[in-house]
Amino acid sequence: MGPKGPRGRRGEGSKGRRAEGPKEQAIERIIVDMTNLQGVRKYGDGWRPMDSTDLRAYVGLLILAGVYRSRGEAAASLWDAESGRTVFRATMPLKAFHKYSRLLRFDDRQSRPARLATDRLAAVREVWDLWEERLQALYNPGPEVTVDEQLVPFRGRCPFRQYIPSKPAKYGIKSWVACDAKSSYAWKMQVYTGKAAGGCPEKNQGARVVLDLTEGLPTGHNVTCDNFFTSYELGQRLLERNLTMVGTVRKNKPELPPALLQSKGRQVSSSRFAFTPTATLVSYLAKRNKNVLLLSTRHAEPDVSDRRDRKPALILDYNCNKGGVDNLDKVVGTYSCRRMTARWPLVIFHNILDVSSYNAFVIWREINPDWMPGKRNKRRVFLEQLGKALVKPLIQRRQRLPRTEAASALVKVIRGERVSAEDRPQARERAAGPAAAAAPAAPLGASKRKRCQGYEIGNSHIPQAVRSSGSKSSDSESSSGADMAGDYEDWMCDDYQDNCQEDYTHNRDTPGADMEDTRDQEAETSPRSPDSLVDYDIYDSEESDYEVHTQDVDSEQLYSEQVDDEEVVYCEEVYGEEVDTGAVVECEEVDDDEVVDYATFVARPKNHIFGDEGLQRHPGVTDARHNV
């Protein structure tokens, strides 16, 4: 088994920019060529060809939009001269961003029908395969590997869209993922494209997925998976590759001995073990009439912990390593670059960017363990630097300056030109004086979308837009002048750690010990035989020398959900955007062209989606009705 971490020699100069490999260049060339081909077909001679600098700047803006927690925000507001971010206007016009989003392609659309006959992923297959190969070449996973599923939210038209009611998004594109259990680095991924052409369900799909995702994995690793994948046959086939397996088992498996399925007459927190020469089965009674079954080819002894719940060591190992993919979903969703789209290939491309940016952060953290010690906002700073590094070449080659003064000043700074004091946003604010600051803001125009608008009660000023959750005010855009000045100062700051005094709060990037397994797969239809198909030696902890301490433990606690340090509230009235605790937001319900009703609410901290009782009307604001 090779050492964990990035592949290659960590010699001198490893912190510098690494030369691009042929696969990165191939992926970039495919996207640029296919997008230009589609642009010529759409606009003819009016299409200005895209190059690699344009593509990287477009990707950089997507990453920055995710860093600023603007996933659900309209692109027009990001480019807004008053409330937007200066870096967006300084990089490219809004029309160019929309044009790239509409025309971005990953294959030749005219030759696609022939490939769709045999491959449902034909629209992105070439890019996906090249990208997936690159994941394995850049990182050696640790001794613990987790295999699970990932659901990317999507409700548009897609021939292999899945419905999983236990997932938060419920509808989306499902992928099988093998990742490092500790760092959550996505080592191998496979998109599930639905049933075969004949319509018959695939037999032993779970075993096939694990074998595919662990192909090429160095020997000596342990694979942790849940009951959709685990079977005795899979464990034996992994042992042939010198890989071990730990996972929960469904009770309808034919190889299970009847003695382990019985729960009547057993004491709570008791364990029963069954052994073969190569496998170990454990039945743990977490609660009356509820036992949990696990299979392992790694453990050979009936070890039981000294904890009050007397959990076996096999279950404790499973709980420590089962959350790799769940943690990947959490950290990817924190700063996701997903944008609203009706094209499923673009959804897959956004997920590629999210996973790639997190994998890059993992590699950077492994190579530079002393980078920003003691800080919890490392990933946010890394992504912000990554996004700005991608957009910088396009800003430098801009021939015309943007119209807004702040964006123009930012372009001059990046080009290395001298910026006069009068051009800086802070200087203009000071020159305007307190009279300009006290002037009321101009009313926003009517919109056909629901918006969260600023509101002022007493002496407390509420932000123009509430776009972030679970973060301090430095992550939000408190005012238009502060936004422009903040972007300007970020570019002037060379060292985020020493010079930039930003203290962002951020969810932990390391997987927790107890992550909820929310899988809701179809139960297998194969009937269970009353007699086991495998001969086991039964070992009962009740009849052994172990002392069993009875404790009323719910079996659901085995998969308890990890709780973040900060409570995050979700408000459906604001298009599902996350709202800071105590923030006052104005919600407009729009029906066609008429504003029916709006009111101001105070968000209370909740751990679930707001219902009617979760919204409190602010005492200083009354309801109002008006027409657009």
Image (cartoon, rainbow, N blue to C red):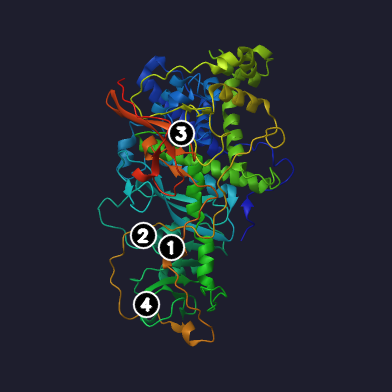
Among numbered discs 2 and 4, the one appearing first in the sequence: 2
Among numbered discs 1 and 3, the one appearing first in the sequence: 1
* Separation of marks 1 and 4 at Cα, in angstroms: 18 Å
Disc 3, SS: strand
Q: Quadrant of residue 39?
A: top left
Among numbered discs 1 and 4, the one appearing first in the sequence: 1
Q: Residues within 10 Å of mark 2 (few under 14, many from 20)?
A: few
Among numbered discs 2 and 3, the one appearing first in the sequence: 2
Three-letter code for the amino acid on which mark 2 is drawn: Gln
Task: Depth check: give the residue in front, 560 or 40.
Answer: 560
Task: Depth check: give the residue in front, 226 or 619.
Answer: 619
Instruction: State if disc 2 and disc 1 touch (CB < 8 Å).
Output: no
* Separation of marks 1 and 2 at Cα, in angstroms: 13 Å
* Separation of marks 2 and 3 at Cα, in angstroms: 49 Å
Which numbered tag is attached to residue 261? 4
Residue 430 drawn above or below residue 301: above
Residue hosting label 1 = 226
Instruction: State if disc 3 and disc 4 touch (CB < 8 Å).
Output: no
Which numbered tag is attached to residue 584? 3
Quarter of the figure that contains the C terminus: top left
Disc 4, SS: helix
Residue 110 drawn above or below residue 238: above
Disc 2, SS: helix
Three-letter code for the amino acid on which mark 4 is drawn: Leu
Q: Depth-wise, is mark 1 or mark 3 nearer the camera?
A: 3
